[in-house]
Amino acid sequence: MRSNIGFIAVGQGGGNIGLLFEKLGYTVLFMNTSKEDLSTLSEAKHTHHIKNGEGCNKDRDKAKNLIIEDFDGISEQIKQKLKEEYVYVIFSSGGGTGSGSSPMLMDLLIQHTDKKVGAITILPSRTEPLKAFINAYECFKEIEEIENTCATFVLDNSRGDKISINKTFVDLFNTFIDIPKHRHVRGNIDMAEMKELLSTRGAAIIGKMGKNTSNTPRLIKLFKESVFAAPEADRVIKYIGLSASTKIDLDAVMLETGTCLDVFQGTNQENTIGIFCGLTLPYTALAEMREKVEGDREDVQKSLVATSKTKLTEGINFLVDTQAKKPIPTKSEVSDVFAKYRRK
């Protein structure tokens, strides 16, 4: 299964996770509007600087325009570097380059290539500035409107240290992908079932337990409390994949997750790995961000208006009245800006 999956890491947030996947042998194409950010990925094999980009300073529209202008170059890079059937686009939803360009990039890949396309995205910590919340909300509005997406893995930076979250997720994803390697006479999750799990639209959560710590209550806790965004309380779920090292009570699990359409089960000697697919996106977390933005809207607008107004209207330099007034040079002599600051 590993050879069927490649990644496009967009922006700095995507690049950090992409490097971890590349070290495990996956093909990763790193893209950014900032040459400075790309230069920090000195070990990366495949990088592409989006033409005319100088960074997007959290401006989603700027990122979209740059992607459109350079789409022929981007398409050629994807065609040359990514031969895999599944492509996961990795990005931060609260930033600029990744947040602005990734949903559009996913949509274009789905419509104009034969790739199966999913997302690995990151929710901002609730301590980040309002701009990150606005970007994340707008980003997910676009994601939910894309048809025929594969699974969307939503990490939440409120769940701990960013570096630890990234490492934990990559380990979970990689362990899940390697499930078909663990064959057992009692049953296996086969390749077709793995592809069905990966191809399922909606949010997905992975949980992993060692054989000695594997039990039903812990799996339920991992579903609710992990590096992923908290699952919604609506009990919407399509599939459960379970490669188990010990007996797991699936009826008890579904009392918490909701009743799924099907369960793909296998036996695993080393770990218990559960994947929950076809969940709704993290609307509760996004609603909290929207409420925060709405609550602070008046103060932010007041600040923006205040900095655009001229309040210092009266001069205090009495010396100017004792000096002869000097004529304002014509535009041919100095710029309008110089003339603006010349004393009259």
Image: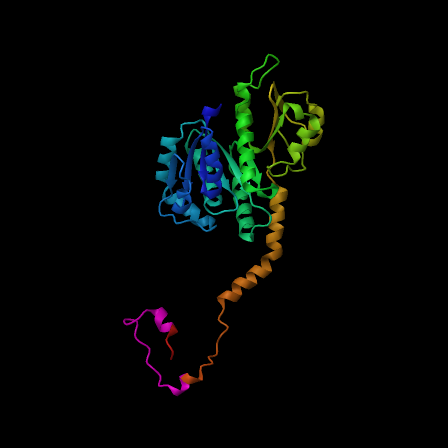
Residue 285 among those drawn in magenta: no
Question: On the rendered image, what quadrant is the C terminus found in?
Answer: bottom left
- Seen from the viewer's position, the closer of residues 166 and 94 is 166
Q: Describe the colour scheme in one phrase.
A: rainbow
The image shows residue 116, relative to residue 193, as above or below, that is below
Residue 241 visible to an observer of this rendering: no
- Seen from the viewer's position, the closer of residues 208 and 137 is 208
Residue 329 among those drawn in magenta: yes
The image shows residue 247, relative to residue 288, as above or below, that is above
Which secondary structure is most common in the magenta stretch? loop
In which image quadrant can residue 254 be found?
top right
Figure label count: 0
- In percent of width and height, residue 310 lies at 48, 71
Residue situated furthest top in the rendering: 185
- In percent of width and height, residue 62 lies at 43, 49
- In percent of width and height, residue 200 lies at 55, 29
The image shows residue 264, relative to residue 285, as above or below, that is above
Highlighted range, magenta? 320-340
Query: Who's the residue at 42% across and 45% down the image?
Result: 37
Horizontal side of residue 71 vs 20, given as left or right: left
Query: Who's the residue at 35% across and 39% down the image?
Result: 73
In which image quadrant can residue 161 be found?
top right
- Seen from the viewer's position, the closer of residues 152 and 271 is 271
Query: Who's the residue at 43% across and 27% down the image?
Result: 84
Residue 314 visible to an observer of this rendering: yes
Residue situated furthest left in the rendering: 332
Residue situated furthest front in the rendering: 212
Query: Who's the residue at 67% across and 36% down the image?
Result: 234
Horizontal side of residue 285 vs 167, given as left or right: right
- In percent of width and height, residue 284 lies at 64, 43
